[in-house]
Image (cartoon, rainbow, N blue to C red):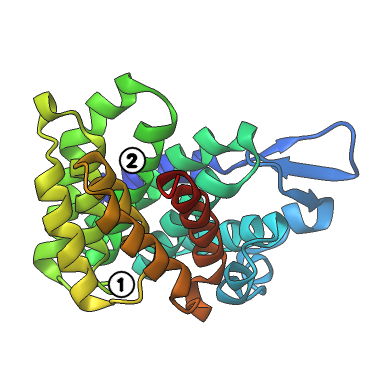
């Protein structure tokens, strides 16, 4: 039964990234706009997988590279439905495209990321990657596309993050605790949110990586809501002073910019 469910989510994921004809080009684009030549579109799996998706993803600030990375992992998953690594990395790439890609493409990317995350979870339920990136895609979709989405996914997001946390508390330097801290910050109190629990999870995340720029930023936002602005300023200054992690440079630069803007507001 588990394999049947995994196959179902795989088919959903693949259908979301299938190519569509484009009468204005000498090739075709997939559903997220990646242009394929006629030769690439008809190439066998081995040819489609020739690119190094990890190298492409490292260049994810270039939207074309991010799309190509996702496209390669989707092709590998299509050719090898049991490929857990391709499934969770596809979910991660879709999350990036769904939060940083062109606006018209974001919702479709996140929907595809949720499908890939489900596939990863069913392929390896005892690994944290699938649970975490499933939650990340659902959370981004809920935050960006309205209250209705937020209410729909709030329980599933927390459950996935709690599962990731139980499997490996130190995964991605405490990322599940950080994401749970954000969940408790964003969700209204009547639906389970709590600024105090947000603070607790974020401080726990900092025990894994005290230099985490995103965690310091999120903690500052929680502290501001708790009317502890002096502490919030300290967290923002720490975020700005922290070094950029080479593996997360695109994200760290973005969060440093946000910390700088927020600090200017709370310092007035």
Element under disc 2 = helix
Can you give x and y, in whole percent of width and height, for residue 265 in the image? 46, 44
Observer-nearest of 110 and 169 = 169
**Residue farthest to the front?**
268
Q: Earlier in the sequence, mark 1 or mark 2?
A: 2
Element under disc 1 = loop
Residue beneath the point at 89% across and 40% down:
25
In the rendering, which numbered label is found on residue 36? none
Observer-nearest of 216 and 121 = 216
Q: Quadrant of the C terminus?
A: top left
Q: CA distance from mark 1 to mark 2?
A: 18 Å
Can you give x and y, in whole percent of width and height, for residue 206 in the image? 23, 71
Residue beneath the point at 81% across and 34% down:
22
178 over 156 or under it: above or below: below
The answer to whether mark 1 and mark 2 are in CB contact below 8 A is no
Q: Residues within 10 Å of mark 1 (few under 14, many from 20)?
A: some
Between circles 1 and 2, the one closer to the viewer is: 1
Question: In screen coordinates, is 213 left or right of 182?
Answer: right
**Residue receiving disc 1:** 172
188 over 52 or under it: above or below: above
In the rendering, which numbered label is found on residue 138? 2
């Amino acid at each position: 039964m588990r394999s049947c469910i995994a196959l179902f989510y795989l088919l959903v994921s693949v259908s979301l990234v299938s190519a569509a004809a484009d009468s204005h080009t000498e090739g075709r684009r997939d559903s997220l706009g990646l242009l394929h030549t006629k030769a690439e579109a008809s190439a066998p799996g081995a040819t489609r997988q020739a690119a190094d998706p990890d190298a492409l993803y490292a260049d994810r600030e270039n939207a074309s590279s991010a799309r190509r990375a996702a496209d390669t992992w989707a092709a590998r998953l299509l050719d090898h439905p049991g490929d857990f690594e391709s499934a969770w990395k596809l979910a991660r790439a879709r999350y990036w495209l769904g939060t940083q890609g062109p606006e018209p493409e974001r919702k479709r990317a996140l929907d595809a990321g949720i499908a890939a995350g489900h596939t990863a979870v069913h392929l390896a339920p005892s690994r944290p990657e699938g649970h975490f990136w499933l939650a990340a895609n659902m959370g981004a979709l809920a935050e960006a596309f309205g209250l209705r989405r937020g209410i729909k996914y709030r329980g599933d997001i927390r459950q996935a993050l709690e599962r990731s946390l139980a499997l490996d508390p130190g995964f991605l330097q405490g990322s599940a605790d950080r994401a749970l801290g954000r969940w408790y910050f964003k969700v209204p109190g009547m639906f389970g949110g709590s600024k105090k629990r947000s603070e607790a999870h974020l401080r726990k995340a900092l025990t894994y990586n005290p230099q985490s720029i995103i965690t310091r930023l999120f903690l500052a936002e929680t502290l501001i809501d708790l009317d502890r602005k002096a502490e919030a300023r300290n967290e923002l200054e720490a975020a700005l002073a922290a070094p950029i992690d080479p593996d997360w440079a695109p994200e760290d630069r973005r969060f440093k910019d946000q910390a700088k803007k927020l600090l200017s507001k709370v310092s007035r």
